[in-house]
Amino acid sequence: MRNVNITIDGMKLNVPGDYTILQAAKEANIYIPTLCFLKDINEIGCCRMCLVDTGAKALQAACVTPVVEGMNINTHTPKVVEARKVNLELILSNHVARCQTCYRSWTSCELQTLANKLGVDQERFSGEAKKYDIDVGISIVRDNNKCILCRRCVSVCHNRQTVGVIEAIGRGFDTHIGSPFEKSLWETPCVNCGQCINVCPVGALRECVDTDRVWAALNDPTKHVVVQTAPAVRAAIGESFGIEMGTPVTGKMVSALRMIGFDRVFDTNTGADLTIMEEATELIDRFRSGGKLPMITSCSPGWIKFCEHNFPEFLPNLSSCKSPHMMFGAIIKSYYAKKMDINPEDIVVVSVMPCTAKKFEIKRPEMHVKGLRDVDVVITTRELANMINDIGIDFVNLPDDNFDDPFGEASGAGVIFGATGGVMEAALRTAADILSGASTDAIEYEEVRGFEGVKMAEYKVGDVVLKAAVAHGLANARKLLAKVKAGEVDLQFIEIMACPHGCINGGGQPIQGSSVRNWGEVSALRAKALYREDKKSYYRKSHNNPAIKRLYKDFLGMAGGTMAHQLLHTHYKEREKYPENK
Amino acid sequence: MADCNRKIDNVEQLNEIRERMKEKLKPRFEEGAAIHILLCGVAGCLSTGSLKIYEEMDRLIKESGKEKDIQLVSTGCMGLCAQGPLMVVYPDRVMYTHVKPEDVEEIWNSHILGGKPVERLFATESDGRKVAHALDEHSFYTKQLKIALKNCGVINPLSIEEFIGVDGYKALATVIKEMDPEEVVDLIKASNLRGRGGAGFPTGTKWAFAASQLERKKFVCCNADEGDPGAFMDRSVLEGDPHSVLEAMAIAGYAIGSDQGYIYVRAEYPVAVKTLNEAIKQAREYGLLGKKILGTDFSFDVEVRLGAGAFVCGEETALMTSIEGNRGEPKPRPPFPAVKGLFGQPTILNNVETYATIPRIINMGVAWFNSIGTEGSKGTKVFAVGGKIRHTGLVEVPMGTTLQDIVFGMCGGIPKDKAFKAAQTGGPSGGCIPAIHLDTPIDYENLIALGSMMGSGGLIVMDEDTCMVDLAGFFLHFTVDESCGKCTPCRIGTKRMYEILSKITDGKGEVEDVDRLNVLARNIKNSALCGLGQTAPNPIISTLRYFEDEYMAHILEKTCPAGVCKSITKFFIDKETCKHCGICKKHCPVAAISGDRKTDFVIDQEACIKCGECFKRCPFNSVLHH
């Protein structure tokens, strides 16, 4: 793209021709306030905060207006400043500002920050404020009283996820975000991915909070409360305490969990290693016995529900493996309970997940063994951070601690599950060894790393050529599956994660607002933390994890065997999008 | 198949039809042996019973066995809607007004058979005179110059052959046979035609942008989502002369390199939709839409898309979003539709009246068109005149005609000879023009300078009994309702303005409220995303500009000078002038007035609902309000 010459506030600038005014101003070190704008997600210019004067009849939104040769932009004339302030006052006049009790207040509320930054200190335009019922779902809570109609949630749900269960309804002042037929979110084909929560600039969206149930279990002396943490949690929870983004804080997190009072602190990575054993075995089995291919991973409950609603024809392609924390929960309530001689009914398994869909997953009727739920409570990374704050733990200065035995440290293969391509890479590490019958040198499969929407690679593993693809974000998944369906691609193994960039950007992760997301790469930093942990690991292949070896030897028998199937595998069902008489 | 037989393969065949039809239509334009009875079959006339009249006349013609000599034609709008149903008998050119089914027999016997026109049904002038040849004598018609409405009320809109007989599709033939696309664009540019839909953007410039795009797929769209309250000129064109629009769209397609057109028409116009669909069907049968038109390599087709009634879908980007099947909301511009419009492809959008003007420009020449109008605004403009006005209806006048001419010269002024207070142009996006500016020549620039705008041409006349604060609230409420809700200033700002206005008309206003209105108006204008939002405050801005004293009366004195705002208006009877006639008492719907020949007439303020009936009815002006 050719560069263009523009003037911003009297400064002459030469910038790429595909820049927006907002980008150009950033280059000139000029701050233009934004609210609805979220890079790559929501670029619609609706909040009218980033207005600038380009000499046109009306003020222009800097976030969507491209620069053109000779453009003369003024970013803070009295006209501009007044318009921004008035628009912000108007937004505030229809926003239930219960800041004292809002979970986003003083941490990540972009509206509050903006009001503060623009010096909005009066309420000139108070008037009727709309009142809405709060929509409490299984994973997600929507509070339209706080909604400022920036439409980020709508954009991410439609464009990134192609789920499209929320949209603006009504006109004018009656406009609100809702689901088709004004249904509750849980009555829709929502996949509970929680991406809407992550992009919301205010407190209008959040997860269903389950920390009270955790505290109740912890305070019940008859209960043995076990916690497990997903790989992506350690890569992000530090952000909640001001630790630099991309810093893995595994040790501090384990310390904090112990201080909270969990009886045992386990690493879901062990579950991930277990998943790899089962999944790699299943893949090889399908391969050899002419089973349904391509096999598609089943770790992401958002993806599973998406598949059940939108691609029922691919249900036989889904790996029958439960997701890692569900597998691990089942093992805790069987193998571990037996080993420790605890009545499994007295064990409460709490999973700390970067994910809101897992809250739905544990409630699926098939996710139990002998009437016992595999996992009892799922809390998100954010909820854990809140628990840590609740009891006044100085997280930043905690010493490091290690996960508990008998599972101890998991493999590096388990930890990279948190980034897109990680499950594929971990599976390849194990499959390569199984198929070649020896320990291969290949560990890092670079082709499946990174954030390209759909990644494809071909590997010669042992005597077979394995054609693999990785998709993250459901729009990419939809694209890939359409190709598979049309016969345009020939694949044997597909990894799909519901969330763009994988679990590191899951719907339960600490919220990074637009001031960070518009100018930095949050996911890249978090992924780096995971790959760093992997590199540091003693064992980097799941099947080398001694705890896993022991587990199969002492308890499960063969991977893919009868016992394994009973505990670690599941099944799926086609779901209608809007079943009647709900 | 019959359909195949009708296909016109070349210009010669088109010319043949034209000559044949010219002969047939002669009675309507010159002389002729045959009698043509034209009856308006749309809009107001349709709703006041023209269908029944048609059936009655049709029966009489059939019974008489004179079908060959007497032709009955249902036409589009004839303009003088206030006196409809309208009927014109050609070649006598006698216009009948307020025709009722029971009048038909008299017209038939006296006029058609007996040659003696029925005087009592002649059109009424503003001074009460009856005129036989209204089209040639009535002031409503004599000052008009019809370009866009040329065929409305003269031809059968459902007959493509009648259209061809009045030079229809001649311009298209000229263009695709004799001109390069660039020449067409240049011609439209040279005509100085400006968009009739609102902002008055030069049509030729718009076409040139789209023509210069290299994409292979381009679209030609027609905005028929007429939404201004009181405006119905686009509807009249679609109902009365649909082929003009199709012809112009095909010309536009040729000029910019497009083979596909869409007409976005509101579903609330069922007659227009039906007429359009029929016209498209006929044009396809005749090969004037479709592949290889008139034997050339040019192909063009048109489809109709229905709007669901959202006002904002008249905004170009919202209209295209709606055609794409999405919630009709505007998008920021740039990119402009001429670069990236419908389905992401270069698209031009013009409104119905603009299109209807184009074939005439091509047939009559650029010089002719440029000789009409003012320096910056060429040609004519159709106004839908309504409100407190004698001759409600559609008028087409040269740009530069004064408001005085339209309101008083053509439309007969205000009923009951009340005083003119203001006129609203541009619908809810426009502003009011007070009496002091009655003499301003109306064109795009002058209206903007007065704080109003052309809009689509709605013209609503207000008399002395109109409260301007209430009026501003009326228009603002429309925009509040019709805001799409996408951008902050329009969604919340207009609502807040309306709340403040309601406070003022309720007698609870404070002086600061005027400041608040000004701040909001200024900022909504400056910062809304689309034209609808940016112009939403105009009714307040212009009433504040010309009638601030009325606002202040509501705020400071808690009175409504026009006696309209109920919360602060009290009606009472002046004992001095009351003649005890009892008319007020008789008409009071809630029996709030007491009194008789001997005792004073008094209004019970508790019971009074402030409908103003007593005030309007009192023959002695003894009912007063404050």
Image (tube, rainbow, N blue to C red):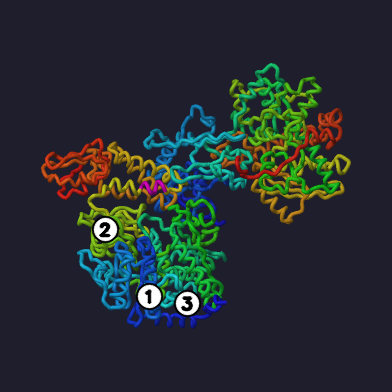
Q: Is residue B499 left or right of residue B462?
A: right
CA–CA distance between discs 1 and 3? 37 Å
Q: Chain of mark 2?
A: B
Marks 1,3: beta carbons within 8 A: no
Q: Chain of mark 1?
A: B
Instruction: Say whether residue B626 is visible.
Output: no
Q: Which three-letter amino acid code belongs to the residue tagged 1?
A: Ile
Sequence-first disc among 3 and 2: 3
Residue occupying the point 68% across, 39% down? A301
Q: Is residue B73 left or right of residue B572?
A: right
Disc 1 marks which residue?
B61
Specify the label residue B173 is tagged with.
3
Question: Same chain for marks 1 and 2?
Answer: yes
Q: Which three-letter amino acid code belongs to the residue tagged 2?
A: Ile
Q: Which three-letter amino acid code belongs to the residue tagged 3?
A: Ala
**Residue reaching furthest to the top:** A221
Q: Position of residue A396 (x, y in %)?
A: 62, 25
From the viewer's side, name the closer residue of A429 and B483: B483
Instruction: Say whether residue B162 is visible.
Output: yes
Tag nearer the camera, 1 or 2: 1
Disc 2 marks which residue?
B389
